[in-house]
Amino acid sequence: MPQQERLALARQQARRIWRLSLPYFQSEEKWRARGLLAGIVVLNLVGVWLLVQFNNWYGVFYDALQNKDQAVFWQQLGHFTLIAFGLIVAAVYRFYLTQLLEMRWRAWMTGSYLKRWTANHAFYRMELARYGQGDSSAPPDNPDQRIQEDLNLFTTYTVSLTMGAFKALVTLVSFVGILWGLSGAFAFELGGHRFEIPGFMVWMAVLYCLAGSLITHFIGRPQIGLNFRQQRLEADFRHHMVRVREYSEAIALDRGEQVERQQLDLRFARVLANYLQLLKAQKRLIWFGSFFGQAAVIFPFLVSAPRFFSGAIQLGELMKITAAFDEVQKSLSWFVDNYQELAVWRATTDRLTTFEDSLAALAADVASQGARHQLSDGVLATHDLALALPDGTPLLAALNLQVEPGERVLLKGPSGSGKSTLLRAIAGIWPHASGSVAQPADAMFIPQRPYFPDGPLRDALAYPKPASDYRDEDLRTALRDAQLPQLQDSLDREDAWSQKLSGGEQQRLAVARVLLKKPRWIFADEATSALDAPAEQAVYAKLVGQVQAAGGALLSIAHRPAVSAFHDRSWQLVPNDGGAARFRLQQAPLPAH
């Protein structure tokens, strides 16, 4: 890769990190964040200052040993105690403030990302786009993992690596002058001329660490891509296990355990295969890092030994040179020592950046995608409504529909004709639409597969409102009216209701939720498909009674002929032969009943 391209990539990466980091320090918590950061910086400066004092202590202490000066020896032990105690206090509070900053930063970023992910149905639109495209332009995978794990890694590594680099820089500035003054000049003759290199030990440290950094980058560079891929594969493996748990009953009934085990084994094999490559890359880097670190221990003694044995310097000055060289070398070797962490940080930054770009794109497209949606006082109406699939295939076009209060409309059509998609567009959540929709304000939608949060039954029944908004008697009445009398005494029982209840019980609980809240308008998408005929008729009688009492209307998607008895109009989706869209909607007579 050309040098200019590498510099461009480095600048791009720096902009990404800055774009991810800056908002917190400009947020409503900016003074607390900046205060914690300033505290960490001060403690790092104090720590470096104490290290300088330690370096001075080395000279006096070891000279006292060499001269057998007992008084100075005991005096320096007292100085050691003070310096060591100061370093301990600085280290403890630096750790505490660092962890506090990481925790608060992660909490703020998590709240910010959750807000944006759940705003304007971004979580729903992101999944539609990801499964609808299947190419590099699709939104990022596993947003849950990026919010939960990647944000944690990003804040942790950003604080630790940034403060580590800052400390290394301050240490370098503080000790390079000390080492320059102690190391003296290196003299040699060449071609009859005498040459001297001042600050010889400094130049040796620079050359030593520069060579180590270049070799480290060459050896460790593959870890960036491997870490990125490892996080994705781990998330895919975890996601499939969650799906097995979520659909445990269906898998058990289908005897699909072996297939799911094979799928899990396949995903875990990919995790292990990539991890093995990452492990080999880390092993190569550790080989070099270990040699580099061990050589650094003896290197300053080898260079300074001739001056010591010639009597030019005493033991104390030799130890000061060695200690100063060690600090300079560690500062210059920061890149070498932290390369693995830098690789993880780079991969995490890339994953968060793609997620950030996707959220920003969704937020920018919220006005341009989807039909124009507004709430009306009491009429459902669409104007030139057109619907498409996520891949862009036209599904329905030029729909001009109207439903008045008091009407009950049945929507029918073959599977895949767009019945559920039409209800999503009416609800305002389908992004692949154009035209306009006027939806009654006081409306509720009953999906074919309802959602129930884990926890007390009363919370599942009242969702998304708090259960405290309703009286216990109202909750029990709704359960009885929805043909769930066996649950009326279980309001405080906690369970995973989406798995505990049968399909028919889940649909009746969704109906109970509607009967509890008493909306004027009800939109039902195969809301009784899992019920037997008597239960279905009883439930529909309650729904019709609800909209009639409230002065609203009912729009249902259903296939069973018996459901038509509860409706007075019918719409039929039929193939649109020769048209641009795949289906068209027409008025249809209700079946005789």
Image (cartoon, helix red, strand yellow):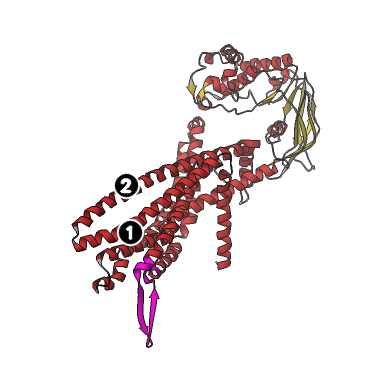
Q: For residue 503, which quarter of the picture?
A: top right
Asked if the stretch drawn in magenta spans residue 441, the answer is no
Q: Is residue 2 visible?
A: no
User: Where 120 sits versus 499, above or below?
Assistant: below
User: Where 560 sits versus 36, above or below?
Assistant: above
Q: CA distance from mark 1 to mark 2?
A: 16 Å
In this view, the residue in front, 542 or 370, is: 370
Query: Disc 2 on helix, strand or loop?
Result: helix
Q: Residue at x 72, y 28 (%)?
A: 412
Q: Is residue 59 visible?
A: yes
| Residue 160 percent coordinates (x, y) | 45, 49
Q: For residue 314, which quarter of the picture?
A: bottom left
Q: Can you say which quadrant of the picture contains the N terminus?
A: bottom right
Q: Which residue is mark 2?
A: 85
Magenta stretch, residue numbers:
179-202
Query: Given the image, on which type of amino acid does mark 1 rest?
Result: Asn
Q: Can you say which quadrant of the picture contains the C terminus?
A: top right
Q: Residue at x 57, y 40 (%)?
A: 113
Q: Which residue is mark 1?
A: 55
In terms of sequence position, does the residue under pointer 1 or pointer 2 come before the other?
1
In this view, the residue in front, 33 or 86, is: 86
Q: Which mark is residue 96?
A: none
